[in-house]
Amino acid sequence: MRIRHSLVAAGVLAAGLLAAPAFAQIKIGFMAELSGPQGALGQDQYDGFMLVVEANGGKLGGVPVRVLKEDSQLKPVIASQIVDKLIEKERVPIITGITFSNVMMAVHRKITEKEVFLIGSNAGPAPIAGAQCSPYSFITSWQNDSQAEVVGKYASDRGYRKVIGMAPNYQAGKDAIAGFRRFYKGEMIDEIYTPLNQPDFSAELAQVAASNPDAVYVFYPGGLGVNFVRQYKQAGLTGKIPLLSTSTADGVTLPALKNDALGVISGTFWGPDFANPASKKFVSDFENKFNRIPSQYAAQSYDAALLLDAALRRVKGNVGDKRAFMAALKAADFKSVRGKFRFNNNGFPIQDQHVFEVTKDANGRVSLKTLATPMKDHEDAYHTQCALK
Amino acid sequence: MTLGLFLIQALNGLQLGLLLFLLAAGLTLVFGIMNFVNLAHGSLYMMGAYIAAAVFNASDSFVLAGVVAVPATMLLGMIVERVALSRLYQRDHLDQVMATFGLILFFNELVRIIWGPAAVYMNAPEALSGSVMLFGIGYPSYRFAIIAVGLLVGAGLYWLIHKTRLGMLIRAGASKPDMVAALGVNISLLNTLVFGLGAGLAGLAGWMAGPILSVQSGMGEPILILTLVVIVTGGIGSIRGAFYGAILVGVVDTIGRAFLPALLREVVERSLAQAAGPAIASILIYLLMAVVLAIRPQGLFPVKHG
């Protein structure tokens, strides 16, 4: 009796195991900053990702997926606990999102060592592009420095000789200035680092006005960027001294800045005016659904979903075969909103980097317009330190 | 470093100081009179800014934004005081800190739910959006408006505190609350009024800050810390202390930020100056507070007793 029961149970279990790869729903952990002042970035990442999932009727690559949405609250400790929960309890094979670099640094090793695939759609700190790179990590955004490097190149191309750099006094701020300097040939007449929680730049702007440089380069993400750009305008500097920037005038801050940001130059990998079909579809779908111009953060995450869609289709939903799934991700066989897309040895994209100017679009809304493409097929500065082939 | 630049920076310091004063005045009264630690004061400032921005976006009128935001924040403050805070007056400071910290989290999420996570648009009126040339450097006209409003509020509060019956009760309540209660004054009503006044001033500060700072969830916390430094430096419970303390903190902070890194560069190597300059500049006001606390623990301009 007991033996027969056990046999039946074993049979059911075995059948379940066999059937699993074909029918199972794949769980995807999505973790980002969704609350607090930085919540706008995470929300755009989530909206961009879900746009693909929902358009496909809850499937990616023809496989039903369940997206487990988690808020890391910009706290590395909480992010680490969430990752434990996602991996140990929910047994997710894939984690995507990750907004801030400090959160990425806290969870990158933990995720990849467990052989869980990490599809990062924003943060790209230097260590994970270099020595700590992993074959389980794929980043659909950029390495942090790249967005600054392209602006540095642009400043040189424009022949600016005297530039003042400004950023918050923390790692990402210093990385941005370092990235700018890497491709800027002129002189940095000053580098001003302000405390991360300082919202008012009156003192620094008076210094800038007094030294009258050829241009100012800034990295002020989120609300800091709103403050800075607005105060730059009010001090009468906009239109007088060109303002070059990274992560300052972007899809998240422009709705709060509006006309105050006109003329600001920004460097990144994608803009809402891109003419390729993938980008056009993305922008129109996003605007229809959310009634706002998508930010680059939504675009990065939209690409992350497209990447997963293509890779899951290629392995027919069998993420258990890690080598095959890894190869499928690496192939990046999808139509990116940025046009050409391929992964470097370190799991970061090799891509064009552009500069944009804040102008009014055809509907009179303040948006980003492509100005130049100073870097073609740009590779990040750290990929040579990554041991992967 | 020219004299012109120095004067511009002093003006910047004065402007920051007067903005801080609007917040410090309300906070110091609540601290001094009710002996109540209200960390949620920055949240009222944020609510003022959000309400102003909402009215501004609906009506396109900067003045109307203020006309609505200031009384609305005042009302909100009084409701919060009646519903939540008045129950905590008898509890110790730690409980008050915990509860008002909870309110910070509550309001931060509330604005995120209502207005979304991204910063909200608000701009200076057209007439004040430009700049005025001073010593060859453009100075934003809007900041002159902040200076003017700050000075007006300072004068108005002086009149209120020193020339009116309500002011007399507030002063009496700050130094001898038991005696005031014993004389039959409705302390509970006085508390609500004082709290409302403080909230209204915080709303005013939020409205004025809207066009220069980003209106977003969490905008109240950095300024709350500065405000706490102001009232401790100036003397808790004293409007005069809040006024001079705010200007002192504003000027020291601005001048430090503006000139310390450059001065440091004269004595030490450039890269070291670049690293140490901002760090030292940002602790100057805390240093100031520590020195004041060591020499005059009651603050620079304490409430006069007796």
Image (cartoon, coloured by chain):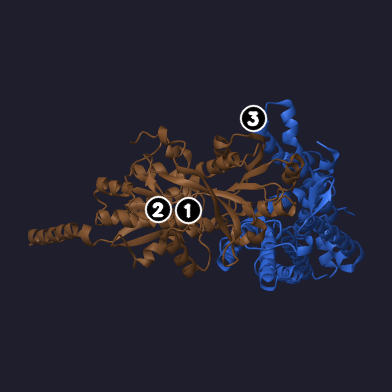
Chain colours: A brown, B blue
Spatial CA distance of label 2 from label 3 is: 38 Å
Q: Which mark is residue A96?
A: 2
Q: Residue at x 64, y 30 (%)?
A: B271
Q: Residue at x 68, y 71 (%)?
A: B55
- The residue that mark 3 highlights is B271
Mark 2 lies on a secondary structure that is strand
- In this rendering, position of residue A310 left or right of residue A175: left
Residue B210 at least partly seen: yes
User: Which chain does the residue under circle 2 lie in?
Assistant: A
Report x, y in % for residue A227. 67, 53
User: Which chain does the residue under circle 1 lie in?
Assistant: A
Spatial CA distance of label 2 from label 1 is: 12 Å
Spatial CA distance of label 1 from label 3 is: 35 Å
Check if mark 1 and mark 3 are on a common chain.
no
- In this rendering, position of residue B287 left or right of residue A4: right
Mark 3 lies on a secondary structure that is helix
Q: Residue at x 29, y 55 (%)?
A: A312
Q: Quadrant of residue A25?
A: bottom left
Q: Quadrant of residue A29?
A: bottom left
Q: Quadrant of residue A51?
A: bottom left
Q: Please state which of the two labelled residues, at mark 2 or mark 1, is closer to the viewer.
A: 2
Image quarter in which the N terminus of chain A is found? bottom left
Image quarter in which the C terminus of chain A is found? top left
- The residue that mark 1 highlights is A72
Examine the rendered structure and indicate whether residue A30 appears above or below residue A56.
above
Report x, y in % for residue A381. 47, 36
Report x, y in % for residue B230. 77, 49
Mark 2 is on which residue type?
Thr
Crowding near the residue tagged with mark 2, few <14, some 14–19, many ≥20 C-alpha atoms within 10 Å:
many
Q: Please state which of the two labelled residues, at mark 1 or mark 3, is closer to the viewer.
A: 3
Report x, y in % for residue B4. 84, 42
